[in-house]
Image: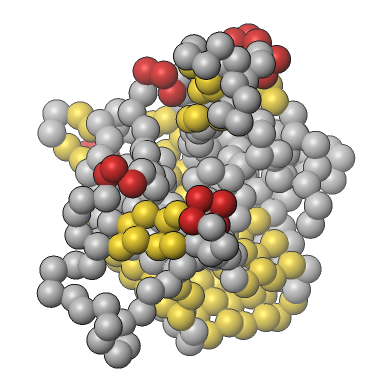
Amino acid sequence: MSAPTACTCTLSRWQFQVAERPAADEIVFACRRLADGSTIACPSDGKQQDAWKTAAPAPGDGLVIAGGYQECRGADIGHNQFYAENVLEELDDAREWFLRTPSEAGSSATLLYIPANGTNMATPGVLVAGAVLPQVVEVAGAASFTLRGVTVTHTAPTYMASYECPSGGDWAIHRGAAVFVEDSTNVTLEGIVFDQPSGNAVMFSNAVNSSNIRKCLFDRVGDSAVALLGSTALMLGLASEGSGKFPTANVIEANLVDTVGVYGKQTSAYFKSKARANIVRNNVFMNGPRAGVNFNDGSAGGEVLEGNLIFNFVRESGDHVRKGERLLVTLCNYIGCYERAATVLLHFY
């Protein structure tokens, strides 16, 4: 499970990676306070990024803003919206928290939390959960494995981990999930409750074949609920050097997904890239920031999407909304995306 060396490439205006597990410091657009103590440099392209890496940071106060690599086109953070967290001065509303680290608090860490109105934290049964593990189940190289009737909850977020751009559909994705299955056959995930996983909930990575995800409940997922992600050499789908692995002949059926994209906004209830001949049927997908289903490319073909109820998506983005319609399904190939809301609704609603 070691990480191979990632290749960072440039195609037109896109930055993308081609590696099964890219390094976390690839395609990072970040702002750094320089040695003069007042200048903050925010690179906006690869050349500026190289110059920024060689600049001398202020002693003890180097990286001040990081991110922008969680989608394929990259982002100049200096001119985009971004999240800020763990700022004591912003602790002023219910359900907000601030963690003072041991170095700041002395010998132990201190958690400051404003409970929801009417909540008494001293009441027996009130739970404070700190998410530590981004992944709680990993299945690799298995055959005939079943996981049934368990609850997976409160996994750690992954939005600051490594992301890769697997193909030309222009979505990036983190190769990881609360339940991560790789290079396995005849795996069944059934009757599992995914309660607020902060990253992807389930991922079938590389050669996962003849497996099933059924009768599962996905509630308030941080990124995507179900992701199928293969690996090839480069975006063209060429197989070499151990690549050319595709999730194949899997069935995702009778699941309920209620809310995806709590953190990541380039997310969906079902995401697939470099996967073939999979069936997604009789599911209910609702509530998300972008497309409910994303076919990030058309590699290999044979995908079936039937009998699903998909609604209330594209709530937080506008790049594939036309004339007041909400596009529920995005179909992409290696060049671009085919986005026609009316046609998609007729076939897949």
Q: Quick check: 268 left or right of 72?
A: left
Residue 290 horizontal side relative to residue 7, left or right = left
Q: What sort of colour scheme is used for the picture?
A: secondary structure
In the displayed structure, would residue 8 be above or below residue 5? Answer: above
The residue located at (49%, 56%) in the rendering is 105
**Residue 128: image location, x then y, percent:** 38, 74
Q: Quadrant of residue 311?
A: bottom left
Q: Could you tell me which quadrant the N terminus lies in?
A: bottom right
Establish if 198 lies above or below 74: below
Which quarter of the picture shows residue 310?
Answer: bottom left
**In-front residue for pair 234/124:** 124
Q: Could you tell me if residue 15 is visible in this image? A: no
Q: Position of residue 64 (x, y in %)?
A: 50, 30
Q: Is residue 61 above or below residue 92?
A: above
- Residue 24 lies in what quarter of the image? top right
Question: Which image quarter holds the C terminus?
Answer: bottom left
Horizontal side, residue 13 vs residue 348: left or right: right
**Any part of residue 61 in sight:** yes
Could you say where residue 124 lies in the image, as x and y percent from the top left? 30, 90
- Looking at the image, which residue sits at the far bottom? 124
| Residue at x 20% of width, y 60% of height | 94
